[in-house]
Image (cartoon, helix red, strand yellow):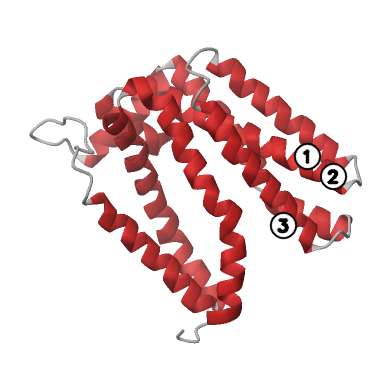
Amino acid sequence: WLGLPTIAVILIVAAPINALRVLSDAAFTSAVPALVGREHLGRANGYLEAALSVPFIVGPAIAGVLVATIGAATTLALDAASFAASAVSLAFVRRTLRAERPAEMPRILADIKEGIAFLWNHAVLRSLVAYFAVATTVTAALLPALAYYLTVDRPHGAELFGLVGSAWSVGYLLGSLLAGRLGGKRVGARMLACGAVIGAMLILIASSTAPAVYLGAGFFVGAALAVQLVSYMTLRATITPDELLGRVGSTAR
């Protein structure tokens, strides 16, 4: 809207957006157990991830239409307004979103230290966060790399990449719903199996030229990622005391 250099603006806003996202995610994952009860945590996380996957199925198409009709800047403004609507909706949640805390809150550095110490001294939690950190790091560039691979290395065009992305999102939706039903047994083995499935599907994509293979592999990668994430979030929250959920979540992040 102001005609400023686009890349400069993106670089300026990227840091505060991601800093605020860490705070938001820590608060979000901390509030869920209090809202739904720990006995329903796995199913609630599955439903939440399923709901979050729907915009990734329909969002790109809607965004494309909006950018073409009202422009990119106005489309981003609508996105900003959606965050405002989300914030207002929190006012209608009547149950508390906080765990019980002492009357005198400790200093922020003491809070941070306690969260780090709890995570580091808990063997299962430490291993869980380490595993997920590695898995997240090695898959962070997956979509950009896949875009280049399909449109440049294998000149199929942007249409196929869009379809693979949709197959990925549909798999993520169904995987989220499945993960909510799997319960809390053998979560570690489940996460390792999902990592193996993702690796196998990437090898399949790299060794094939068939669009149908790309679509099928994209579906299973999305499903495995969803099961892995829901399992991780549920186990991390299950073994963390209520009063430390926010600090452990932000430390893990």
Q: Callout 3: few (<14), some (14-19), or many (20+) C-alpha neighbours within 10 Å?
A: some
Q: Quadrant of residue 108?
A: top left
Position of residue 27 in the picture relative to residue 93 (left or right): right
Inter-mark Cα distance, 3 to 1: 14 Å
Q: Callout 1: few (<14), some (14-19), or many (20+) C-alpha neighbours within 10 Å?
A: some
Residue at left offset 19%, top offset 37%: 96
Determine whether the residue tagged by mark 3 lies in a helix, strand or loop. helix
Q: Which residue is mark 1?
A: 216
Inter-mark Cα distance, 1 to 2: 6 Å
Q: Which residue is mark 2?
A: 212
Residue furthest to the bottom in view is 3
The kind of residue on which mark 1 rests is Gly
| Closest to the observer, 250 or 161 | 161
Label pair 3/1, CB-CB below 8 angstroms: no
Residue at left offset 83%, top offset 62%: 157
Label pair 1/2, CB-CB below 8 angstroms: yes
Q: Which residue is mark 3?
A: 162
Q: Give coordinates of residue 105: x percent, y percent.
A: 14, 36
The kind of residue on which mark 3 rests is Gly
Residue 110 in sight? yes
Q: Quadrant of the C terminus?
A: top left
Q: Give coordinates of residue 188: x percent, y percent.
A: 56, 17
Position of residue 107 in the picture relative to residue 127 (left or right): left
Residue at left offset 31%, top offset 30%: 36
Upstream in sequence: badge 2 or badge 3: 3
Position above or below: 163 against 120: below
Inter-mark Cα distance, 2 to 3: 13 Å
Residue 240 in sight? no
| Closest to the observer, 197 or 121 | 197
The kind of residue on which mark 2 rests is Ala
Determine whether the residue tagged by mark 2 lies in a helix, strand or loop. helix
